[in-house]
Image (tube, rainbow, N blue to C red):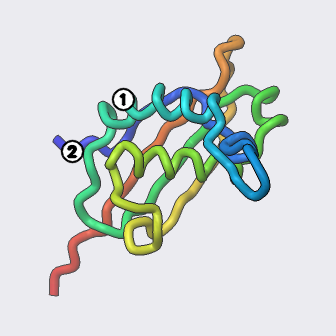
Amino acid sequence: MKKTSCLIGAPFSANNMYIPIGKGQLVKSKKYRTWIEKNIPLIKEGLSKAEKFPITIEICILADWRWTQKNDPDNCLKPIIDCLVNSEIIPNDNNRFVESVMCKFLYFPTNGMGAQTRISYEEPPEVIF
């Protein structure tokens, strides 16, 4: 059975993905590398590799009001989409493979556990003439 939805921990902010190491040079931050390493197994376990493209991706962030007041949905997109590529769910994040990305927050009382992220995708329907 094809798996098209998974749950991971809190999304990572694109603001913290890279750190400068010299004039015009950036590297992935340690926190970002740790986040990737933690979430790749969850994504690979929860999502099947997409087979038909371009896909539509939906990201739903379940978080309490404190978390949503400090974070922007647009800053969460890039790290998640990059993680889908690193997990080999999609070969690339360009328009050939990703038609659209939707992100929304839903209030969810976390009791101090932080946010959770639901990632799902839909492949294009087969066109029959």
Badge 2 local density, few (<14 within 10 Å), some, or many (20+)? few
- Determine whether 14 is above or below 98 in the image: above
Whether residue 62 is visible to the viewer of this picture, yes or no, is no
Picture quarter containing residue 4? top left
Badge 1 local density, few (<14 within 10 Å), some, or many (20+)? few
The CA distance from mark 1 to mark 2 is 17 Å
User: Which is more toward the observer, 26 or 17?
Assistant: 26
Residue 79 location (% of width, % of height): 58, 46
User: Which is more toward the observer, 61 or 79?
Assistant: 79
Residue type of the residue flagged with mark 2: Lys
- Residue at x-position 69% and y-position 12%: 111
Q: Secondary structure at mark 2?
A: loop
Residue at which label 1 appears: 41
Residue 39 location (% of width, % of height): 46, 31
In the image, taking residue 46 as reference, residue 37 lies left or right, namely right
- Residue at x-position 57% and y-position 57%: 102
- Determine whether 112 is above or below 41 in the image: above
- Residue at x-position 64% and y-position 29%: 31
Whether residue 63 is visible to the viewer of this picture, yes or no, is yes
User: Which is more toward the observer, 45 or 25?
Assistant: 25
Residue at which label 2 appears: 2
Tag count: 2
Q: Secondary structure at mark 1?
A: helix
